[in-house]
Image (cartoon, rainbow, N blue to C red):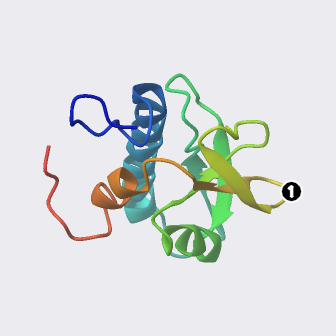
Amino acid sequence: MAFGGRREPAVSLSDERLAKNEILFREINERLDEMSVPWSKTTDYLCECSEMACTKIVELTNEEYERVRSRPTVFVVAHGHERPEIEKVVERTEGFLLVEKVVAVDEIAEHDPRSGEPDAD
């Protein structure tokens, strides 16, 4: 709804902050992926949930991580770390969940470290 000719934001500032937290964890995981040893069967990644204080580790194979990263709006999180108000669970495994953002999708795509796009910030 517009007020005084202005459009209201599609997402709340709180939801945007939560999405930005997840983007930060994704950027860290990209560095971990770059440092992983090629002969290793799995690599430890940080849970990409929205909680800044989260230190939960999720273990993924190289193939699993590449599958997650093939879609910029999908994040890997530990069980119980999903936030239904900003994401939906698209896959459940024994060790982790894959969640897809339902808010701030443009923001996530802009900050995707694999997009090759420079950060506007």
In the image, is residue 11 above or below residue 26? above
Percent position of residue 116, x then y: 22, 70
Q: Which of the 4 quarters of the picture holds residue 31?
A: bottom left
Viewer-proximal residue among 20 and 77: 20
Count of all numbered marks drawn on residues in the image: 1
The amino acid type, in three-letter code, at marker 1 is Glu
Q: Residue furthest top?
A: 53
Q: Quadrant of residue 115?
A: bottom left
- Left or right of 69 in this view: 54: right
Residue beneath the point at 65% across and 35% down: 56
Whether residue 33 sits left or right of residue 61 in the image: it is left
* The one of 31 and 2 positioned closer to us in this rendering: 2
Task: Point out the image quarter for the C terminus.
Answer: top left
Left-right relation of 92 to 72: right
**For mark 1, does the 10 Å Cα neighbourhood hold few (<14), some (14 to 19), or many (20 or more) residues?**
few
Quadrant in which the N terminus appears: top left
User: What is the residue that sits farthest to the front in this orientation?
Assistant: 4
In this rendering, the answer to whether 105 lies above or below 62 is above
Label 1's element?
loop
Where is residue 62, by image quadrant? bottom right
Which percent across, then down, holds residue 14?
46, 26
The residue that disc 1 covers is 94
Q: Position of residue 61 (x, y in %)?
A: 65, 69
Query: Which residue is at 41% across, 46% downward?
Result: 23
Residue 114 lies, with reference to residue 4, above or below; the image says below
Extreme-right residue of the structure? 94
- At 13% from the left and 50% from the top, the residue drawn is 120
Question: Image height check: is 82 above or below 88?
Answer: above
Which is more toward the observer, 56 or 117? Answer: 117
Question: Which x, y percent locates residue 50?
Answer: 54, 34
